[in-house]
Image (cartoon, helix red, strand yellow):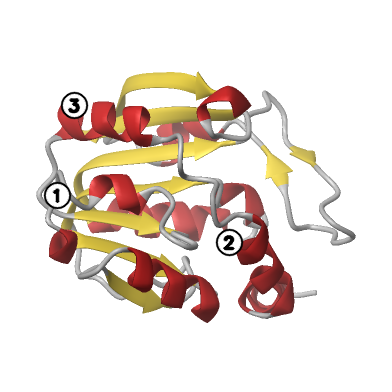
């Protein structure tokens, strides 16, 4: 497959029945995450926030409140997920689009982030997605993803090329030297996460 066709294959996967099944499995996943998001909002004090790959809003539900919902944005490739996010978070702004082509101006957000989204990007488009996130952020970039010191593809529900463990913090530092790591940590299943390593960067 060409780089573009592989990206479109995965986007079609997540926007259709495969992605709808993910929505059904993960409706309650964000319930225990309030403490983490309160600490991030306290540290970054954003006025406008973007989540790339927001699904049903399990993360944004804790951000909308400390940040006015009308200043909280979520994008996803799955229309069903966005319908449920808007229903759960009145005032939430959403867009249905691929992560490699975000419909926002440069540095429009104070904080832009992914949680479990970069893991689903193929090598060919991963730098594009990361670059779009950095482009849209005026100051803070946060990623929470499965970590491995070396790239490892993980078989995922019968699909190939759909889930990768990598050192995403190192990749951000290598690709975007204007980013400085300010904090990092690990979020386990006991806190409502699926063993996620997170990194918070500041544009300097």
Q: From the viewer's side, name the closer residue of 70 and 101.
A: 70
Q: Earlier in the sequence, mark 1 or mark 3?
A: 3
Q: Report the front residue among 84 and 54.
A: 84
- Distance, label 3 to label 2, CA atoms, is 30 Å
Q: Nearer the viewer, mark 1 or mark 3?
A: 1
Separation of marks 1 and 3 at Cα, in angstroms: 13 Å
Q: 10 Å neighbourhood of mark 2: few (<14), some, or many (≥20)? A: some
Secondary-structure class at tag 3? helix
For this orientation, the residue located farthest to the right is 158
Q: CA distance from mark 2 to mark 1?
A: 31 Å
10 Å neighbourhood of mark 3: few (<14), some, or many (≥20)? few
Dot 2 or dot 1: first in sequence order is 1
* Residue plotted at (49% across, 62% down): 55
x, y (%) of residue 193?
Answer: 56, 34
Tag count: 3
Q: Position of residue 194 (x, y in %)?
A: 62, 35
Q: Secondary structure at mark 1?
A: loop
Report the residue marked by disc 1: 67
Q: Which quadrant is home to the C terminus?
A: top left
Residue found at x 34% / y 72%? 86
Label 1 packing within 10 angstroms: few (<14), some (14-19), many (20+): some
The answer to whether residue 132 is left or right of residue 3 is left
> Horizontal placement of 1 versus 71: left or right?
right
Find residue 71 and report its image quarter: bottom left
- Give me the residue at 31% from left, 75% from top: 103
190 is higher (above) or lower (below) than 20: above
Q: Which residue is mark 3?
A: 43
Residue wearing tag 2:
125
Of badges 3 and 2, nearer the viewer stands 3
**Residue closest to the eye, 107 or 73:** 73
Q: Quadrant where the N terminus lies?
A: bottom right
Which one is in front, 141 or 77? 77
């Amino acid at each position: 497959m060409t780089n573009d066709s592989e990206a479109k294959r995965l986007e079609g996967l997540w926007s259709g029945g495969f992605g709808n099944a993910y929505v059904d499995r993960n409706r309650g996943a964000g319930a225990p995450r309030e403490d983490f998001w309160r600490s991030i909002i306290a540290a970054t004090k954003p006025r406008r926030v973007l989540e790339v790959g927001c699904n049903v809003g399990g993360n944004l539900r804790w951000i909308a409140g400390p940040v006015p919902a009308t200043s909280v944005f979520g994008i996803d490739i799955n229309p069903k997920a966005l319908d449920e996010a808007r229903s759960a978070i009145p005032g939430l702004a959403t867009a249905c689009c691929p992560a490699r082509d975000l419909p926002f101006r440069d540095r429009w957000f104070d904080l832009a982030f992914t949680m479990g989204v970069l893991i689903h990007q193929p090598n060919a488009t991963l730098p594009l997605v990361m670059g779009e996130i950095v482009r849209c952020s005026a100051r803070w970039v946060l990623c929470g993803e499965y970590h491995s010191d070396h790239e490892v593809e993980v078989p995922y529900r019968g699909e190939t090329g759909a889930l990768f463990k990598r050192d995403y913090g190192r990749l951000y530092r290598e690709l975007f030297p204007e980013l400085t790591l300010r904090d990092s940590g690990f979020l386990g299943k006991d806190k409502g996460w699926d063993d996620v390593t997170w990194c918070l960067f500041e544009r300097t």
